[in-house]
Amino acid sequence: MNKNNILSILWKYYGEGSDFREGQDESILSALNNKRTLVVQKTGWGKSLVYFLTTRILRDKGEGPTILISPLLSLMNNQLESAAKFNLIADSINSNNKDEWDRVVFNLLNDSVDILFISPERLGNKDFIDNVLSKIEKNIGLLVIDEAHCISDWGHDFRPDYRRIVNITKRLPKNIPLIATTATANDRVIKDIKKQLGDDLEIIRGPLTRESISIDIIKLGNQAERLAWISENLKNINGTGIIYTLTVDDTKLITSYLKNKGYEVEDYYGGLTAEERSIKESKLLNNEIKALVATVALGMGYDKADISFVIHYQKPGNVVAYYQQIGRAGRALKDSNAILLCGEEDDEISNYFINSAFPTEDEMVQVVNTVNNYEGLSQKSILSHVNMKSGRLEKCLKYLEVEGAIYKEKSKYYPTLNNWKPNMEYSKQISDIRRYELKRMNDYINSETCLMEFIAKELDDNTAHRCGKCKNCTDSRFKSNVEFKNVLDAIEFLKRNHLTIEPRKQWPTGLDLNGNGKVNILSEYRMEEGLVLCSYGDAGWGTIVRKGKYLENKFNKDLINASVNLLKEKVKEWDIDNILYVPSLKRVNLVKDFSYSIAEILKIPCHDAIIKIKDTVEQKTLENSFYQCQNVIDGFDINDNIKYLGNVLIIDDMVDSKWTFTYCTYLLRKKGIADKVYPYALAKTSGNEGRE
Ligand SMILES: Nc1ncnc2c1ncn2[C@@H]1O[C@H](COP(=O)(O)OP(=O)(O)OP(=O)(O)O)[C@@H](O)[C@H]1O
Ligand SMILES: [Mg+2]
Ligand SMILES: [Zn+2]
C-alpha cells in the first residue's frame, strides 16, 4: 500500500477528487505497516476517518475485525453513521444491550462484524474477557483507542477503566496494529501514553489551532445575568449549537427558561435513556432545535458538521476540557462562535468536583474492610456497612477494583490476595494537578493575549500562533452587558422555578421496618409528591433562604408570601386538613414560626404533632441512606396527644435525603393519625452531584 492506493480507496467512499487532510494518509499507512500509532490532531480534523478507512482496507484484505474502545458509547449513533460511510458493519457490546451479546459474539465469530465498539468498562468485566475477548483476540485486525488521553492520569478526563487497556494490549499478539487518537494530549500526556503502549509508538502530531472558531469571554456575576444574556443574544447568533453547563440541574433550568422565552431547545445529560438521548441528538442533527443544553455527556467526539456556536453557562474546570468542548463548533464551517460566560462563583462548583474526584482514605478503608469481612456482598448490601452515598461507593468500588484491592464477580465483591494499602500520595498528586488546571483556567480568562494561542500552548503545540479572530485579537463580537429588566425577569423566573419532591418507595437495605426482610415502603405508608420552593443558594429564593437560616434565624415575609402563593391552590387540590412541621432542637422557632405563619394565612390549623426526641447529627454529615434513615428513626416521634388529622402538609426548611419526610409520614400513617401526607420544603440542598 502507498499513498496513491489509499487515496483511490478514499475516493471510492468520499467521492472522486476528495483528499486527505494533512497527516491522515500518513497515519493510515503507519497502522497498515503494523505500527502502534498515536494520532494527536485537532478537534474535527478527522481522526475517525483514519481508523475507519484503515479498518476498511484491512477487512478488504481479509483481516479480522477492529475493536474500538471509546468512552462515548452514548454517541453511538453518531459513530455508526460515520462507519456506514465506509460500508462498515459496526456493532457494539455495552451494558445497555446485554440481551444482544450472544448475537454479536456469534456474528463476530462468523466474521460478519467489521468493527466492534466497546466501552472501557467492558474490559473490567470478567464475562466479557472470558466469553468474548478470549475467543476473538487471536483474530483481531486492528485495535483502536479513541480519546486516548483518558489513559493518562494527567489527561483532563482520566478514566480508571482506561488503565485496563494496557492489560489488553499485553494479551494481544505484538504485531496487531493499534491506532490511538486524541486532540488533547500535551507532552506530558503523550509521554504517559507512550509508557503504557510501548516505546516504539509512532506519533503523528499536527497543529491544534481551530481556524474556524472565534472565542469570546463574557464575565457575568450570577445565574440571573447569564440567563438574561443568553435569552437576549441567542436569537442573533446564526445556526444551531450547544449550551454547556456543569450540572444536570442547570441543563433543566436553562432549558425551561429558554423555552419560556420561545426558543426551541432541549436538555441533554447522561441520565436520560438511550432512546431519549437519541431523539434529542437527532433533533439537533436535523436542525429542528436551536440548541441542546448539555452537560459533558455531549462532549468528546460529537460530530455535527455545522454547529455554529458553543456557549458555556459556566467556566469549565480546565482549559483542555474547554478546548475539547468548543471543538464541537465550526467543524465544516468557515466561522463559528465559542462564548464563555463566567464569574467567580463557578470555582465553587469546580472545587467541589476536584475535592470529590477520589475516594478518601477513610472511604477506601471502610469498603475494603467490609469486603474482607463479608466476602461476596453486592454493592447495595455494602452500602449498609459504610457511611457513603451510593454514587461515592460506586466510584470507590471501581477505584479499588482497578487498584487490585478487590474484585467483582457476578455483581458481588471479594477481597484479592494482594496486600493492598491506600496510596493517598497518588490521589493527592492528581488533585493538585486539577487545582493547578483550575488556576490555569482562571489565567486564561484573565489573559490579554490571543485565547486560541493560549490553549494551543497549553497543549504544547509548537505551531501555536495568534488566531486573529478571538476577543483579544480583535473586538468582542457580543455585548457584555445585559438589560436590567431582563435580569429582573430572570430573577423572577428563578423564584418561580420550584421543584418537586418525589416520594421514596424503598427503605434502605438492612433496615427492616416491614419486619419481613422486604425493603419496599408499603403504599399505605408512603408520602405523596410534594414541593420545594427553590434550590438552596440559587439567585432566586435560594440566597434569601440561606440568609434566613444562618444569619437572621427567621424566614422573612417574602419567603412566607412566596410559599403561600405556591401552596394556596395546592392545599385545595390536595384537600389539606392540617399543617404540621418538622421541629428542631437547635433552632427551635425557625421552622415552627414559619409554619404557623403560613398556616394562619392559609386558614388551616397547625399542630406541634411531630416531636424531636433526640438531638441527632445533621443529615448532611451522613453520607448514605442507611445512616441517614437510622438517624431519623432515632430522632423523631409523634406526640401522644395528637388525634386523627386527615390529610396533612408537613413543612420543613431543607430537604436532601427525604428520610425525615419519609419516616415522619410512615409514623403518622402507621399510627392512623394521617391519611395522605404532602411534604413542602423551602430549599433543596443536594450537592453538586450529577455532573453528566
Ligand atoms: N479528508 C476528509 N475530507 C473531508 N471530510 C473529512 C475528511 N476527514 C474527515 N472529514 C470529516 O470531518 C468531520 C470530523 O471528523 P471526526 O469526527 O473524525 O473528527 P475528530 O478528529 O475525531 O474530532 P474530535 O477530536 O472532535 O473527536 C467528519 O464529519 C468527517 O466526515
Ligand atoms: Mg473523534
Ligand atoms: Zn486570537
Image: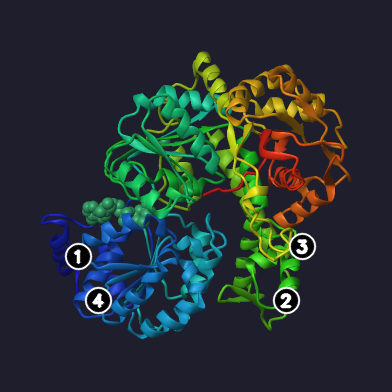
> Nearer the viewer's eye, disc 3 or disc 4?
4
Q: Which mark is residue 112?
A: 4
- The answer to which of marks 1 and 2 sits earlier in the sequence is 1
- Confirm or deny contact between disc 1 and disc 2 (CB under 8 A): no
- The answer to which of marks 3 and 2 sits earlier in the sequence is 3
Q: Name the residue under label 3.
A: 362
Q: Which mark is residue 87?
A: 1
Q: Which residue is drawn at 63% across and 67% down?
A: 379
Q: Which corner quadrant of the image does residue 591 belong to?
A: top right
- The answer to which of marks 4 and 1 sits earlier in the sequence is 1
**Label 2's element?**
loop
What amino acid is labelled 3 in the image? Asp
Rounded to the nearest whole Å, what is the CA distance between mark 4 and mark 1?
Answer: 12 Å
Ligand 1 sits in quadrant:
bottom left
Rounded to the nearest whole Å, what is the CA distance between mark 3 and mark 4?
Answer: 49 Å
What amino acid is labelled 4 in the image? Ser
- The answer to which of marks 3 and 4 sits earlier in the sequence is 4
